C-alpha cells in the first residue's frame, strides 16, 4: 500500500484490470486517453481489453502468481469481473490497493449474501430463502409460494443457472437443472414487476458519491437487450432508486462503481435484484449521453480523483449486438447500415467469433426524447441484423 492512502493516482500511473472483456476494453480506452497505463489479467489470447492495454498478463484468474504479478505491475487494481477469487484478492491487497476490495466482492459473488446485505441496509428485495438441499427447497417453496425462481447462489449471470417454478409439478425439473450447477442456491419469490431499472453509483476513494440517472432495461432470455435512459418513471421513483444505490455503495464501502439492478413493482416500490461492483451493460450509453462515461467514472473513483458529472446531456437508448444477431460480426455490412440512423454510434468489442449468447458490441442512439432514442436504436439494430 502507498504511505498516504488518500493521495490520488495521477496520469502516468499504472492501472491493473482483472478481466479482459468489453468492460475492461472500454475502461482501457478511457484510461489511455487520460494518460494512464493499463495492465490486464485475462486467460484469453486476443481479448477485447488486451487489444488496448500496455501489458497483458495472460493467465487464469486462479493463478496466484499471475495475480501477484498484476499487483506488482500496478499502482492500483480494479476489475471488470466480479467472480475473482476473494482469497487471491486479499493477497494482492498486501501489495497494492484493490478497488473495490475483497469484502465487497464476497457479497457481490453470492446472491444470498447480496440480499442479506440489502436487507441489513434497509433496502427491499423479493422474498427469498437460502437453499442447500432438495428438502430445503420444498420447505422454502412452502413458505414463499409459487411462482418462484430457483437460482445458483454463485456464478449466475445473464439468466444462467436459473429455473422458474410455477407450481409443484415444476420442482423436480428445476432442481435437476439448477442443482447440477452448484451447491448453494436461493429461492426467490417471482416479482410481478412493472419495469426493470438499474442505477450505477460511483464512490470515490475519498468517499464522494455520484449516481448516473436511472436506466430502464428490457431483457431477452435473461440477457439485456435494450436500455433506455432516463427510465420512464416518476421523479419520486427515480430518486428512491438512486437513494437505494447510494445506500448500498456506502453501506458496503465500495470504492469504484456499484451497479444495482432493481425491479419497480406494481406499487412503485423498488426491490433490489442484483448488484455488480463494476461497470455495467446498462451504462454503456453514458459514453455518448452523460457528462462522464461510466468507465472514466470508474477510473476517477479508484484513482481518488474528483468524480465527473453523471448528468444526462441527451436522452439515450442502447441495444446489444449479440452473436446470434446476423450481421454483427466484424466486416459484415449490417453494422454499417445502422450508422444511417441519426445520432447513432457503433461499438464493436473486437471479438473474433460471433457465437450465440456472446455480446459482440452495441449501438447507442441519442434523440430529443427517450422514446425516439429507443425507436432510433431499434431501427439501427434491425438494419444491423438484416444481413446474414
Ligand atoms: P438475474 O440473473 O438475477 O439478473 O436474472 C435475470 C432476469 O431474470 C432478470 O433481469 C429478470 O428479468 C428475471 N428475474 C430474476 N429474478 C427475478 C425475480 N425474483 N422475479 C421476477 N423476475 C426475475
Image (spheres, rainbow, N blue to C red):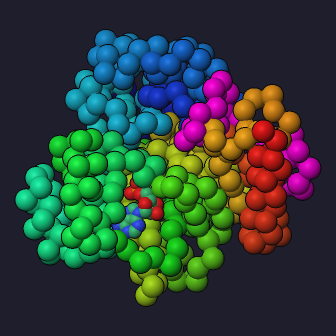
Residue farthest along the bottom direction in this orientation: 267
Residue at 55% across, 59% down: 219
Is 111 rendered above or below residue 214? Answer: above
Which image quarter has ligand 1? bottom left
Image coordinates for residue 285, horizontal then vertical, percent: 68, 53
Residue 85 occupies quadrant: top left
In the picture, the quarter occupied by the N terminus is top left
Residue at 72% across, 32% down: 329
Is 323 rendered above or below residue 252? Answer: above
Image coordinates for residue 334, horizontal then vertical, percent: 83, 41
Count of numbered circles in the view: 0
In this view, the residue in front, 9 or 243, is: 243
Residue at 27% across, 41% down: 181
Instruction: Say if residue 83 shows up in the picture.
Output: yes
In the picture, the quarter occupied by the C terminus is top right
Residue at 63% across, 26% down: 353
Residue farthest along the left direction in this orientation: 135
Q: State left or right for residue 116 relative to residue 289.
A: left
In this view, the residue in front, 325 or 235, is: 325
Magenta region, residue range = 336-360
Image coordinates for residue 283, horizontal then vertical, percent: 59, 53
Residue 139 occupies quadrant: bottom left
Q: State left or right for residue 68 relative to residue 340.
A: left
Instruction: Say if residue 188 shows up in the picture.
Output: no
Whether residue 33 appears in magenta in the rendering, the answer is no
Whether residue 350 appears in magenta in the rendering, the answer is yes
Is 137 rendered above or below residue 64? Answer: below
Image coordinates for residue 71, horizontal then vertical, percent: 38, 20
Principal SS element in the magenta part? loop
Amino acid at each position: 500500500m502507498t504511505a498516504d492512502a488518500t493521495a490520488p493516482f495521477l496520469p502516468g500511473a499504472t492501472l491493473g484490470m482483472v478481466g479482459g472483456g468489453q468492460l475492461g476494453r472500454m475502461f482501457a480506452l478511457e484510461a489511455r486517453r487520460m494518460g494512464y497505463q493499463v495492465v490486464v489479467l485475462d486467460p484469453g489470447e486476443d481479448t477485447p481489453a488486451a487489444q488496448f492495454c500496455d501489458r497483458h498478463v495472460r493467465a487464469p484468474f486462479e493463478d496466484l502468481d499471475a495475480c501477484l504479478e498484476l499487483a506488482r505491475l500496478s499502482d492500483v487494481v480494479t476489475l471488470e469481473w466480479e467472480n475473482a477469487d476473494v482469497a487471491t484478492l486479499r493477497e494482492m491487497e498486501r501489495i497494492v490497493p484493490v478497488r473495490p476490495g475483497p469484502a465487497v466482492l464476497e457479497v457481490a459473488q453470492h446472491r444470498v449474501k447480496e440480499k442479506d446485505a440489502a436487507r441489513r441496509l434497509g433496502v427491499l428485495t423479493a422474498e427469498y430463502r437460502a437453499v442447500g438441499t432438495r428438502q430445503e427447497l420444498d420447505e422454502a417453496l412452502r413458505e414463499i409460494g409459487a411462482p418462484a425462481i430457483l437460482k445458483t447462489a454463485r456464478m449466475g449471470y445473464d439468466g444462467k443457472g436459473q429455473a422458474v417454478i410455477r407450481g409443484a409439478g415444476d420442482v423436480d425439473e428445476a432442481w435437476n437443472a439448477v442443482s447440477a450447477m452448484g451447491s448453494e442456491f436461493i429461492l426467490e419469490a417471482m416479482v410481478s414487476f412493472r419495469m426493470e431499472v438499474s442505477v450505477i453509483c460511483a464512490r470515490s476513494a475519498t468517499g464522494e458519491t455520484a449516481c448516473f440517472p436511472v436506466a430502464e432495461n428490457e431483457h431477452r432470455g435473461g440477457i439485456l437487450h435494450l436500455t433506455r435512459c432516463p427510465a420512464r418513471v416518476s421523479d419520486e421513483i427515480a430518486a428512491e432508486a438512486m437513494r437505494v444505490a447510494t445506500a448500498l455503495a456506502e453501506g458496503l464501502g465500495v470504492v469504484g462503481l456499484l451497479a444495482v439492478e432493481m425491479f419497480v413493482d406494481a406499487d412503485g416500490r423498488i426491490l433490489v435484484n442484483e448488484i455488480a461492483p463494476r461497470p455495467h451493460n446498462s451504462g454503456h450509453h453514458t459514453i455518448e449521453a452523460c457528462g462522464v462515461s461510466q468507465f472514466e467514472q470508474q477510473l476517477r473513483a479508484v484513482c481518488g480523483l474528483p468524480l465527473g458529472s453523471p448528468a444526462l446531456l441527451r436522452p439515450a437508448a442502447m441495444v446489444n449486438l449479440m452473436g446470434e444477431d446476423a450481421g454483427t460480426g466484424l466486416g459484415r455490412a449490417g453494422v454499417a447500415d445502422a450508422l444511417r440512423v441519426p445520432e447513432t454510434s457503433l461499438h464493436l468489442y473486437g471479438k473474433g467469433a460471433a457465437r450465440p449468447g456472446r455480446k459482440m458490441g452495441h449501438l447507442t442512439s441519442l434523440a430529443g426524447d427517450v422514446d425516439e432514442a429507443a425507436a432510433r436504436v431499434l431501427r439501427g439494430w434491425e438494419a444491423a441484423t438484416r444481413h446474414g
